[in-house]
Image (spheres, rainbow, N blue to C red):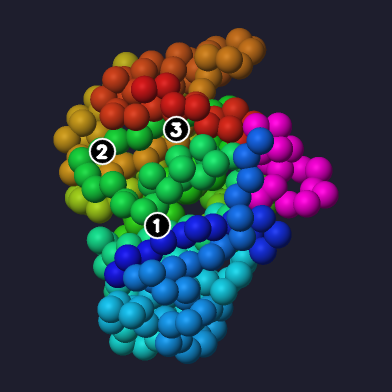
Amino acid sequence: MRIDLPGAAGPRGWPEPGCRCASCGRLRARGISHEPTRVLLDGVPLDECPRRSVPGGYDVRGPCGGRLLYASGPGRSPEPAAGVRYDAALLDLIGAPEHLGDLRHRGALSADGQVGAVHVDHRVTTPEELERRLGWWVRPRSGPYRSLILGGARSGKSREAELRLAAHPYVTYVATAQRRDDDPEWSARIDGHRGRRPSWWRTVETADVAGVLRAESGAVLVDGVGTWLTAAMDACGGWHRPEAVRPWLDELIEAWRASEAHVVAVSDEVGLSPVPATPAGRLFRDLLGALNQRLAAESEETALVVAGVSRDLS
C-alpha cells in the first residue's frame, strides 16, 4: 500500500488561524504552514476508497487490497476490527502515542506495518519535536540499547521516558519507589504515575533492578535510579557504612552493561542542586552523581530534561 499525505495537520491546519499559542507562533515566524490532513491510498483519495466506520475512525481498503486503520480526527483512537491485522495505521500520535503500542500489543498491527501521524497540530511544539518522537514510535528500537534520562525534580523526566517507549508492544515498568503508609502524598504521586501508564504495561515494584535487567529482553523502563539507591542504602546500612553499598552499585552497572533489553532509566541530576545541609544528604548526592556518570558511560543515549524540554547529551 502506497500512502501519500499531501497534508497531515489538524482540521484548521498548523498554525491555526488566529491562534496565539507558542507552537503556532513559532511556525508563523519561520514562514511554515501545514495543510489539514489529506490522504491518498495508491493514488486514490481516502474518501473514495471502500471503508466502514469503527469507533474512533475507519477501517479502509486501498485500491490494491491493503487495509488501513484511520483516526477520524484529533483525539480519536480507532478501534481495530476483530481479527484483522492491518497493513498500515494513520493515527493521532500526538494525542495518544500509546494507542499505537496497544495496536501492536493486540496484534492488530505488525511491528513493520506502515505508521503515520495525522491531525498534527499545536499540541506538539515544533515539527522537529514531532520528528524526534516519530523516531521512537514508527520503528520501536530493539535491544540491547540503553537510554539514561536525567532531570531535576518535576522536570518532566518521567514523562519523557514514558514517551520514548509509548509505541512498544511490550514494556516492563520497574517502579523502585516504595509506598509509605505514613505519607499519603507520596502514595498519591505513585498512583499518579501508575494512572498515566498504558494499561498493558507490566509493572514490577522492586529494588532488584539488576535482576529485571538480566531477565528481560523487550523494553524496560526504570523509574527511578534515585529511589533505587535510597532502597539499596536502607537495605545494606549504607547510610552509616558507605562501602557496603558499593557491591550493589557494581551489580547494577554490570546488569545495565549486559542487558539485552531496550532500557530507559530515569535518574535525578544532582549536579545543579544546592549542597545538602546534612552528611547523609551529601553522601547520597555523591553516590548518585557517581552512579549517573557510570550509567551514562555505558549508555548509547543520555538526555537532560529541563522544564519539560529534552536535550540529547550523547
Q: CA distance from mark 3 to mark 1?
A: 18 Å
Q: Residue drawn at (51%, 79%), measured in percent from left and top? A: 47
Q: Amino acid at mark 1?
A: Ala
Residue on which the image places disc 1: 167
Figure check: 260 above or below 120: above
- Sort mark 3 into few (<14), some (14-19) or many (20+) by Cα contacts within 10 Å: many
Q: Residue drawn at (44%, 17%), measured in percent from left and top? A: 289
Residue 108 visible, this angle: no
Figure check: 68 above or below 152: below
Q: Residue drawn at (45%, 40%), measured in percent from left and top? A: 132
- Which of the pair 122/46 is nearer the observer? 46
Of helix, strand and loop, which one carries label 2?
Answer: strand
Q: Residue 122 at what x, y percent from top left?
A: 67, 49
Q: CA distance from mark 3 to mark 2?
A: 13 Å
Q: Residue drawn at (30%, 69%), measured in percent from left and top? A: 1
Q: Residue 243 at what x, y percent from top left?
A: 32, 16
Q: Is residue 74 magenta?
A: no
Residue on which the image places disc 2: 145
Find the residue positioned furthest to the front: 43
Of helix, strand and loop, which one carries label 3?
Answer: strand
The disc placed on residue 236 is none
Q: Is residue 273 left or right of residue 20?
A: left
Residue on which the image places disc 3: 149
Q: Nearer the viewer, mark 1 or mark 2?
A: 1
Of helix, strand and loop, which one carries label 1?
Answer: loop
Q: Amino acid at mark 3?
A: Ile
Q: Amino acid at mark 2?
A: Tyr
Write the start and end of the magenta stretch as one range: 14-30
Query: Do the residues under discs 3 and 1 have CB atoms within 8 angstroms?
Result: no
Q: Residue 100 at what x, y percent from top left?
A: 42, 64
Of the residues under marks 1 and 2, which one precedes in the sequence? 2
